[in-house]
Image: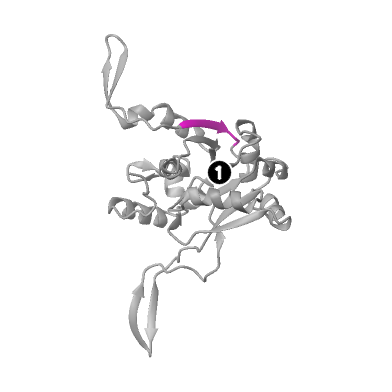
Amino acid sequence: MKAVILAGGLGTRISEESHLRPKPMIEIGEHPILWHIMKIYAHHGIHDFIICLGYRSYVIKEYFANYFLHRSDVTFDLETNQITYHAAKAEPWRVTLVETGAETMTGGRLKRVAGYLDPEETFCMTYGDGVADVDITKLIAYHKSEGREATLTAVAPPGRFGATIIKNGAVTEFVEKPAGDNGLINGGFFVLEPSVISRIAGDTIPWEREPLTGLATDGQLSAYRHTGFWQPMDTLREKTYLEQLWNNGKAPWHVWG
C-alpha cells in the first residue's frame, strides 16, 4: 500500500520557520516532522510514499537526495573523488517526490499524483504537518470493513489553553491543554479508494470541500474515531510543544522501535 503526504503548502501561520523551508521540513528534535510521519506509517508496514511538493520543493528533494549524508558517518576521498558511507542507516522506503504546483490546493495535489497510484489499490493520505499515535493497521482494517470510498480519522482537537478547575469559588486544579468541546474534527490520516480522485475537478479544489462533502452526501465517507494523541503543528507554540515531548522522551507518536 502507498501513502500520499501533502507537503506543498506555504505554512503561513508558522512563518517564523517556514519562510526558509516548507513546513514539513521543520524539525522536531533532529528530524523533519515529515520524517516522523513517515516513521509512523513505516511502523505499520507502509514503506512506499508519494510526497506532493509545492513551496520550496527543492528543500525536500535535497533532503532525500542526501539522506545517507544526513544519517551516516562519511569519508570523502578528494583525490579519487570517492565517497564512503559508514554504518549507513537506511530506511526501507521508496519515496516519489512529485511537483504539484506552488499554488495548488490540497485536492488538486492529490489529483496531480494520480498517475503514481495503482488504479485498483487502496491508499493512505495525510497532511505533512501533524503527528498522532493512530493505529494505521486498525484504521485500514476499519476502512475495508466499512466498504466505503473514503475513511477519515476523527479526533477531538487539543485545547489551546490550560484550564482552571473551580469548585465553590476556590481553584482546585489546573489542567494543561484539556480537549476541546467534545466535537470531533477531521484529523487527516485518510484511507482512500482511487475512485475518490474523480471527484476532484482540478488544481483549485481543496480536498476538504467539494470532494469530502460530496463523499459525505453520497454516504461514502466513514469516520474512524481516534481517542489517543493527535497534534498538528500550525504555530511556533505547537512546534515547541512537540519538540519538548520528543526531547523529554514522552512523544506519544514515537511508536516505532
User: Residues in magenta?
Assistant: 94-101
Within the magenta stretch, is there residue 37?
no
Could you tell me which quadrant the N terminus lies in? top right
Dot 1 corresponds to which residue? Answer: 124
Residue drawn where x is 72% and y is 53% of the image: 214
Q: Is residue 141 visible?
A: yes
Q: Residue furthest top?
A: 80
- Is 190 rendered above or below residue 57? below
Q: Position of residue 73 (x, y in %)?
A: 26, 27
Say which quarter of the image contains residue 26: top left
Q: Is residue 213 left or right of residue 11?
A: right
Count numbered badges in the picture.
1
Q: Residue at x 62, y 53 (%)?
A: 146
Tell me what residue is drawn at x 31 percent, y 17 percent.
83
Spot occupied by residue 128 in the image (x, y as percentages of width and height): 49, 45
Can the viewer see residue 19?
A: no
Furthest residue in direction front, as rendered: 145
63 or 228, nearer to the observer? 228
224 or 58, nearer to the observer: 224
Q: Is residue 223 above or below residue 164?
A: above
Please, what secondary structure does the residue beneath circle 1 have?
strand
Q: Quadrant of residue 65?
A: top left
Q: Seen in the image, is 156 located left or right of residue 110?
A: left
What's under tag 1, amino acid-wise?
Answer: Cys
The overriding secondary structure of the stretch rendered in magenta is strand
Note whether 83 is above or below 20 in the view shown. above
Colour pattern of the rendering: one colour
